[in-house]
Amino acid sequence: MSDRYIAFANSNVGRRLVGALGLPAPVRLERWSAGRTRPVAGALLLGGSGQLGEAVLTFAARLSDSAYAAIDGQHGLRRWTAEHGPALKALVFDASGLARFEQLIELRDFFQAALKGLDLCPHVVILGRAPESLKDPIAASVQRSLEGFSRSLGKEIRRGGNVQLLYVGKGAEEQLEGALRFFLSPKSAYVSGQVVRLSACAEQVRDWSRPLAGKRALVTGAARGIGAAIAETLARDGAEVVLLDVPSAKDALDALAARLGGHGLALDICAADAGQALVAALPDGVDILVHNAGITRDKTLAKMSEAFWNSVLDVNLKAPQQLTQALLDAGTLHDNARVVLLASISGIAGNLGQTNYAVSKAGLIGLAQAWAPALGKRGISINAVAPGFIETQMTAAIPLTIREAGRRMNAMGQGGLPQDVAEAVAWLAQPGSGAVSGQVLRVCGQSLLGA
């Protein structure tokens, strides 16, 4: 469904009226499109003085064909200034070397100057070291303070921009390129204010144009909406896709599978023999498992029937757990596989009339966190993606006033698209994204709910 306010606010007449009245003026977000050769279509500015910046320099030319430094000669790059430099599309600040409170002024100095020269839809990444990995309590405190800074900057940057903080563990430097290819590109258009921890991972992407080549992916709830977008994006990135949905959606499922060169599988995931049936349908196993299938049955708790409660938990929480366990027990889920669970910000912040839904989505986050250590022994990563307000058929049916509130209650002042969720899933499905496990990635435009 189209967002008429964004269309109006970005029209010639709308810009003048919105500016005169002091109304929010959300920018149309740039999203990934076919034919791009580099993640960053514009100037990239590098700052900071830690060791991680040196690691980024080794592949910076693959991110952007126009890289600059904040200090003349730093990293062997030309100096960028707001007066003479090009508009900035991406910024990377290495804060890993900050160990004393007095050094935090470097954040102000770098970003205050850079904010004066931003292009539309800029992407910012701050690099640090996980506070819990540092023995010096002052250094740990300084690194922890980066979270407050990055989230605040995400709410100030405007212009359709976003800000992330990556805590890079020892040995994880080799996975920085994959992370920055996502977070500095339009693939992360609706992701902001996130704190992600990278750990060492032996797996590597061999071909950035098709990072999932040779992988087989299973996507549940794939017939339409977000599930269909996930299937399309995984196929775009080279994966062979197996699409699962309920038998009543078989026609739409088979049509999408045929278009993507994949396979359709009509199955009730809550059936008593669903696990056995799924294992039998996947004789060659899977490398990527995406649990997207989900339902809502909204009522306030006072009016919540047992049937409404149980049906939501059965589909959203119990089925993913049981199906994943069945695939693990049968060896169908390969070593070094990637598992992604579709949670929701409702599972983080709660939502009126959705106690059952919030319970199920919070439970998925719990599964990711609880399973990560054991699955990690086989090189398998498991993470949750938590969408916020996404423009789908479901949200189009929400009453107008509630729908508008949902769209505007985030730092970007708009709803996301199914593609935004799909891009996040596709990144977590990459071989090198085994560096991320047991974590939650919110795709919500930095929602004010649960922030």
Image: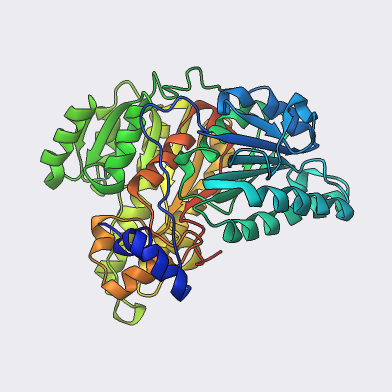
Q: Position of residue 352 (x, y in %)?
A: 39, 75
Q: Position of residue 236 (x, y in %)?
A: 34, 28
Relative horizontal placement of residue 175, taking residue 234 as reference (left or right): right
Relative horizontal placement of residue 14, taking residue 143 as reference (left or right): left
Residue at the (69%, 59%) spot, across then down: 148
Q: Position of residue 293 (x, y in %)?
A: 30, 48
Q: Quadrant of the image for the N terminus?
A: bottom left
Relative vertical location of residue 65 with respect to residue 346 in this rendering, above or below = above
Relative vertical location of residue 417 with respect to residue 302 in this rendering, above or below = above
Would you say residue 370 is visible in this rendering?
Answer: no
Q: Which quadrant of the figure has residue 281? A: top left
Q: Quadrant of the image for the C terminus?
A: bottom right
* Relative depth, front residue between 209 and 256: 209
Q: Which quadrant of the figure has residue 30? A: top left
* Relative depth, front residue between 369 and 69: 69
* Relative depth, front residue between 142 and 438: 142
Residue at the (46%, 40%) spot, across then down: 186
Q: Position of residue 104 (x, y in %)?
A: 82, 53
Q: Which quadrant of the figure has residue 346? A: bottom left
Colouring chosen for the image of the structure: rainbow
